[in-house]
Each structure stands twice: as structure tokens, then as C-alpha cells.
Image (cartoon, rainbow, N blue to C red):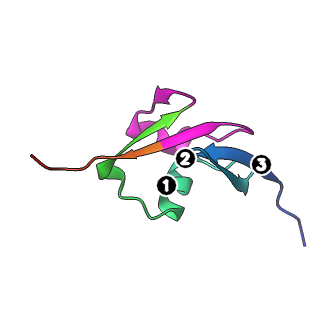
């Protein structure tokens, strides 16, 4: 059985282990986050949601997921 290589990233300030070559869209999906209600930042840059399936996470990347909250 092949062992999956893991890397460490920061997700909202906390360490998280993910498989190497993991893509942002997979991370969002695994976390069950509604994509329409969040902004996603990678290393202090806001990402275009249309490109999430093309962006691979790398060791020590910093991902921030910010939820929009309605109100008034």
C-alpha cells in the first residue's frame, strides 16, 4: 500500500495536515464550507473562486477562509 505524503499548512491560524498536491477546491469541499458564502485567501491574496480547482496547496501555505454574515 502506497503511503500518501502529507504536508502542513495553516488553516485559519491552525496547523493542518493535508495530502501533498491537495487542491483548494478539495479542501473547501472536505470542510463542507458553502463556497458562495466565503472569501478564500491564500498567502494574503484573495482567490478567484473560478480558479480554485487549479490551485495546489504547498507546504507552509497560509489559508484563511472568511465567512460572510448577513445582518443590518
Front label number (2 vs 3): 3
- Could you tell me which quadrant the N terminus lies in? bottom right
Tell me the residue that label 2 is attached to: 24
Extent of the magenta region: 43-64
* Mark 1: secondary structure: helix
Neighbour tally class for label 2: few under 14, some 14-19, many 20 plus, Cα within 10 Å:
many
Q: Quadrant of residue 6?
A: bottom right
Residue bearing mark 3: 7
Residue 33 image position (x, y, % from top left): 41, 59
Please state if 35 lies on the left or on the right of 61 as rendered: left
In this image, 8 relative to 44: left or right? right
In the visual, does 11 lie left or right of 50? right
Query: Can you give x and y, in whole percent of width and height, for residue 15 in the image?
Result: 68, 50
Q: Are marks 1 and 2 in contact (CB under 8 Å)?
A: yes
Where disc 3 sits, the SS reads strand
How far separated are the C-alphas under marks 1 and 2? Answer: 6 Å
Q: Residue at x 50, y 41 (%)?
A: 64
Instruction: Give whichever of discs 2 and 3 has the lower sequence position.
Output: 3
| The magenta stretch spans residue 57 | yes
Query: Number of callouts in the render?
Result: 3
Separation of residues labelled 2 and 3 (CA atoms) = 14 Å
Percent from the top left, x then y, of residue 3? Answer: 88, 64
Which residue is label 1 attached to? 28
- Residue drawn where x is 83% and y is 55% of the image: 5
Q: Secondary structure at mark 2?
A: helix
Magenta stretch: includes residue 36: no
Residue 55 circle label: none
Amino acid at each position: 500500500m502506497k503511503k500518501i505524503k502529507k504536508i502542513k499548512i495553516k488553516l485559519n491560524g491552525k496547523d493542518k495536515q493535508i495530502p501533498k498536491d491537495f487542491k483548494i477546491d478539495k479542501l473547501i469541499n472536505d470542510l463542507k464550507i458553502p463556497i458562495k458564502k466565503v472569501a478564500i485567501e491564500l498567502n494574503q491574496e484573495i482567490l478567484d473562486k473560478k480558479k480554485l480547482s487549479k490551485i495546489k496547496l504547498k507546504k507552509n501555505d497560509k489559508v484563511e477562509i472568511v465567512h460572510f454574515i448577513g445582518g443590518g
